[in-house]
Image (cartoon, rainbow, N blue to C red):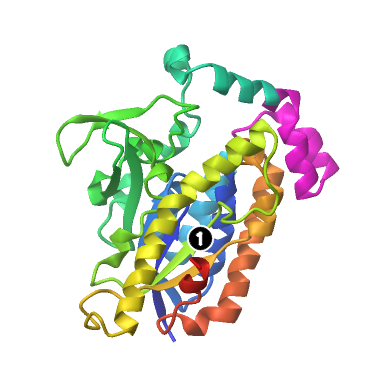
Amino acid sequence: MKKQINLALQGGGAHGAFTWGVLERLLQDEDISFAAISGTSAGALNAAALKSGWVEGGREGAIENLRWLWEQVGAITDPSLSAWLDAASPTADFLAKAMKYSPAYTGFEMMTRMFSPYVYGPAMKNPLEKIVARFHYDSVCATGGPDLHICATNVRSGKIRVFTGDEIQPNVILASACLPSLFQAVEFEDPRTGKREAFWDGGYTGNPALFPLFASELPDDILIVNINPLYREDVPTDSQSIANRVNEISFNSSLLRELRAIEFVKRLIADGKIQRGSMKDVLVHMIADDPLMNALNVATKTIPTPLVIARLKAAGYEAADTFLANHKSDLGKRSTVNLTDMFN
């Protein structure tokens, strides 16, 4: 039976390769199609690549475009740092620790803590700029294919800004992936207000935003691809691990707030306190691999080595395959995430 769903794609740097694997597996299932996609940061890149590829070449076009995207991202690295790691083929845990304590990454991390990206002027450019500029925006903004929503954070107001339709241009995707410790705010004229605005990473206010997917004309199912672990067993004790966990918590907070709101509405509907149909009874699903993400860290998120990307992609593909085997029949019928347990 054909299933139409909405996708919500989290950001998380190079860990977004996990989402690549998830999307490839979903695209291979002819019964699954996408009505709308909300994406932030790496999720925004994945969403734009999927949409433009789908418009130009259907499922195979989307798969090929996602492959092209991550081949380009994998080239953004320091060969001297990654070559010996690739040759050794270490475990994910060893790889993450090796990268975290490498002199190259330690120096880079200290630099970002000590200096503002504005110190370097225009020399400190986002390396994604050249990739994002090569997207086919006629296809990204096309009315055909899934609706596309890209999230960024307005620096001055602190509010979320969700771009859609022909508002989505290279600066919008760069803004969605602009970490303020690494890059200067992305500034451009907001087509909605006509004012020049400054934007940072959308993860601070919507990682990703779910509310654009509540529209009445869209299907009830929202599949969240989560790449920032919700739970970590170990309490971080070193400065890098503490900063990484703070980042994960802050980047998950907006998602958890929206999930709590969904859970509240679902309880009101189930208890008969609001009339069924007056508010959307969202069906929530999630694909994640918290054990793998717990074994990785901020270094593997920041430095996109080919080995890390390949392992994340494979893990995402396997996670999606497991989800389809266990829950494909639930799509359109029931949530597969127990929101009540999540918030108790």
Going by the numbered disc 1, the residue's amino acid type is Val
The answer to whether any part of residue 12 appears in the image is: no
Q: Is residue 186 above or below residue 251?
A: above
Front one among 209 and 51:
209
SS under mark 1: strand
Residue 138 colored magenta? Answer: no
Q: Position of residue 50 (x, y in %)?
A: 44, 56
Residue at 44% from the left image edge and 44% from the top image edge: 41
Q: Is residue 299 above or below residue 321?
A: above
The answer to whether any part of residue 185 appears in the image is: yes
Residue 98 colored magenta? Answer: yes
Residue neighbourhood size for the residue with mark 1, other residues' Cα within 10 Å, grouped as few (<14), some (14–19), many (≥20)? many
| Residue at mark 1 | 225
95 left or right, relative to 235: right
Q: What secondary structure characterizes most of the magenta part? A: helix
**Image quadrant in which you'd find residue 316:** bottom right
What segment carries the magenta color?
A: 76-105
Residue at 59% from the left image edge and 19% from the top image edge: 111
Q: Position of residue 148 (x, y in %)?
A: 33, 56
Residue situated furthest left in the rendering: 194
Q: Quadrant of the N terminus?
A: bottom left
Front one among 300 and 83:
300
Residue at 35% from the left image edge and 76% from the top image edge: 266
